Image (cartoon, helix red, strand yellow):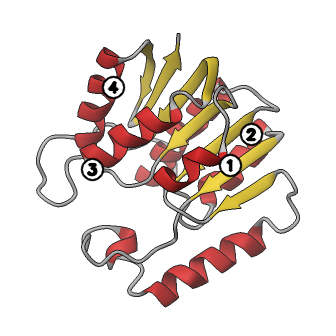
Amino acid sequence: MRRGGFFSFITDHRKRLLKMMPNGSICAEIGVWKGDFSQRILEINNPSELHLIDPWMFQPSFPSRWYGGVKAGSQSDMDDIFESVRERFAGSPEVSFHRKTSAEAHSEFPNDFFDWVYVDGSHDYDSVKSDLELYFPKVKPDGFLTGDDYFLPCQETGGPAPVKQAVQDFVKENQASIVKIIGGQFIIQKN
């Protein structure tokens, strides 16, 4: 493992995923938090459009998640995080903000719009499966649905990996195939 430990290891997997995505593309990130990965997308992929989709909403019903109390303790904290992300990308005209849930935002985009979408919002089975189903038609033919935390156990129960199960079920039910698993990153290609 490189200097920097575990987080460098994770970052390297994300960097490998980004290097597989097309440069100059139209892409979206679902689940933005503070915009660190968004910055990496800009630096590595130089997208023509980057759509940041996140409600930046405090959700105390998920106390084991960052946005439910682990790192943000109130809606005021989430509002501050959103403002810092807006300021961070104020000089990047290719970045658009969609401060709403992924389910609310999907209708803003026509079908076959994105070259790729990165799914990293809520990590429960239903949310991941919904994001995959809602954004699959929005991805161009031969485009990609990608995401994070493929092997992460359920954050509430410690049970089996809900992201992995949602991805596997989605692929079985749709004209898609898993191209690659890189650490905890997944890449699905639309056939």
- The earlier-in-sequence mark between 3 and 1 is 1
Gap between marks 1 and 2, in whole Å?
Answer: 6 Å
Q: Quadrant of residue 168?
A: top left
> As rendered, which of 104 and 30 lies closer to the eye?
104
Q: Position of residue 126 (x, y in %)?
A: 27, 45
Q: Position of residue 55 (x, y in %)?
A: 52, 66
Q: Position of residue 106 (x, y in %)?
A: 56, 46
Q: Which residue is mark 2?
A: 44
**What kind of residue is marked 2?**
Ile
The residue depicted at 73 percent of the width and 71 percent of the height is 86
Residue 47 vs 140, above or below: the answer is: below
Nearest to the eye among marks 3 and 1: give it: 3
Gap between marks 3 and 1, in whole Å?
Answer: 25 Å
Point out which mark residue 40 bears. Answer: 1
Q: Dots 1 and 2: beta carbons under 8 Å?
A: yes
Q: Quadrant of the N terminus?
A: top left
**What kind of residue is marked 3?**
Asp
The residue depicted at 68 percent of the width and 49 percent of the height is 40
The residue depicted at 53 percent of the width and 17 percent of the height is 190
- Label 1 crowding class (10 Å Cα cut-off): few <14, some 14-19, many 20+? some
Circle 1 SS class: helix
Q: Dots 2 and 3: beta carbons under 8 Å?
A: no
> As rendered, which of 152 and 63 lies closer to the eye?
63
Q: Position of residue 108 (x, y in %)?
A: 65, 48
Residue 5 seen = no
Residue 140 vs 120, above or below: the answer is: above
Point out which mark residue 170 bears. Answer: 4
